[in-house]
Image: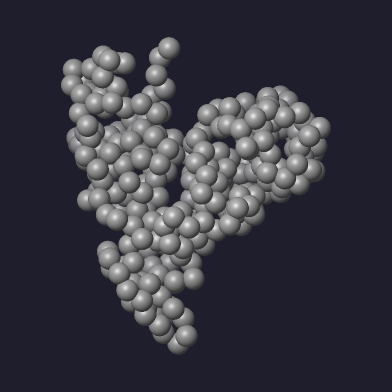
């Protein structure tokens, strides 16, 4: 069976060392560790900015770099194993993060002062390295190793979660713009919403909807309850309760709530009926 190129780094000229014996390549390399240094790093299937994105990596996430050429790096994300190309300027040396952003979006200021001009924005799930604390007019900030300060209440220590209810996390993204391949609070797609919400409660999930379609256990349509996943060809939604679907979708171009039966009827003319129902175990 041919390996999935989304999750396995191999080309005729080069491949990940871990794939020796599984693929043919002129050269195998272990890859070098690196970290995302921009707010969001779009990952593409080719080294071409005109190509659409497959997914995104968040600030502070770690990866392995297999090749650098013409301003692009060919990489594999450590979190979900996704492989692709991103501009080389978006990555830097490995760091040891201490905290994760827990708000859907937050700002980084040049110092512990919210009246200063923002230097960048970070999405939920982003990783930062805290080196100190400060307080201004009663607001507590964390100061960061790469410069600036972030609201302390918007962060949780690495290893902690925002709770156990991933549906409640997903609901915090309602009205976030839909973005094909998006995986952040600035823009997100259907499977990105599932993956990011689960990550924030300490659970790993595959990235794309076809990968997620085998996640958990099969259930019947009549058994749907909060937290269950509903799949169509190329789409996934989260049941917020027995009758409400929560999903990032191209119809409203947002993360939205929709009556489940109405959604099935609306989606059916283009994508037919749901292909499966899964419960996360």
User: Residue 137: where, in percent of width, then height?
Assistant: 45, 87
- Quadrant for the C terminus in the image: top right
Let me know if residue 154 appears in the view: yes
Q: Is residue 97 above or below residue 183?
A: below
User: Residue 46: where, in percent of width, then height?
Assistant: 33, 30
Instruction: Report the side of 164 relative to 85 (left or right).
Output: right
Residue at the far bottom in the pictured view: 137
Which residue: 56% across, 49% down? Answer: 197
- Quadrant for the N terminus in the image: top left
Q: Nearer the viewer, residue 184 or 3?
A: 3
Q: Nearer the viewer, residue 168 or 269?
A: 168
Let me know if residue 234 appears in the view: no
Q: Quadrant of residue 143?
A: bottom left
What colour-coding does the image apply? one colour
Instruction: Report the side of 244 relative to 2 (left or right).
Output: right
Instruction: Report the side of 43 relative to 74 (left or right).
Output: right
Which residue: 36% across, 39% down? Answer: 77
Which residue: 53% across, 29% down? Answer: 211
User: Residue 133: where, in percent of width, then height?
Assistant: 36, 76
Which residue: 20% across, 28% down? Answer: 29
* Number of residue marks: 0
Q: Quadrant of residue 100?
A: bottom left
Residue at the far top in the pictured view: 1
Instruction: Report the side of 107 relative to 180 (left or right).
Output: left
User: Residue 210: where, in percent of width, then height?
Assistant: 55, 27
């Amino acid at each position: 069976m041919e390996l999935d190129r989304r999750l396995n780094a191999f080309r005729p000229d080069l491949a990940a060392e871990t794939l020796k014996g599984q693929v043919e390549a002129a050269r195998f390399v272990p890859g070098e560790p690196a970290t995302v240094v921009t707010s969001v790093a779009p990952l593409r299937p080719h080294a071409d900015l005109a190509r659409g994105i497959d997914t995104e990596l968040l600030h502070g996430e770690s990866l392995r770099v297999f090749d650098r050429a013409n301003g692009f790096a060919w990489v594999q994300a450590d979190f979900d194993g996704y492989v692709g190309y991103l501009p080389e300027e978006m990555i830097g040396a490995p760091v040891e993060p201490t905290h994760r952003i827990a708000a859907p979006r937050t700002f980084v200021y040049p110092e512990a002062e919210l009246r200063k001009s923002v230097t960048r924005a970070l999405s939920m799930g982003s990783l930062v390295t805290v080196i100190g604390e400060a307080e201004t007019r009663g607001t507590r900030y964390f100061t960061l190793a790469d410069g600036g300060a972030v609201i302390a209440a918007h962060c949780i220590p690495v290893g902690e979660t925002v709770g156990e209810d991933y549906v409640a996390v997903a609901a915090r993204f309602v009205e976030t713009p839909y973005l094909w391949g998006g995986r952040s609070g600035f823009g997100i797609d259907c499977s990105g919403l599932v993956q990011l919400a689960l990550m924030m409660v300490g659970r790993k999930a595959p990235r794309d909807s076809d990968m997620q379609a085998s996640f958990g256990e099969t259930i019947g349509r009549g058994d749907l309850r909060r937290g269950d996943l509903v799949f169509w060809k190329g789409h996934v939604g989260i049941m917020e309760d027995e009758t409400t679907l929560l999903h990032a979708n191209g119809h409203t171009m947002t993360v939205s709530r929709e009556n489940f039966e109405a959604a099935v009827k609306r989606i059916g003319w283009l994508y037919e009926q749901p292909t499966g129902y899964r419960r996360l175990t």
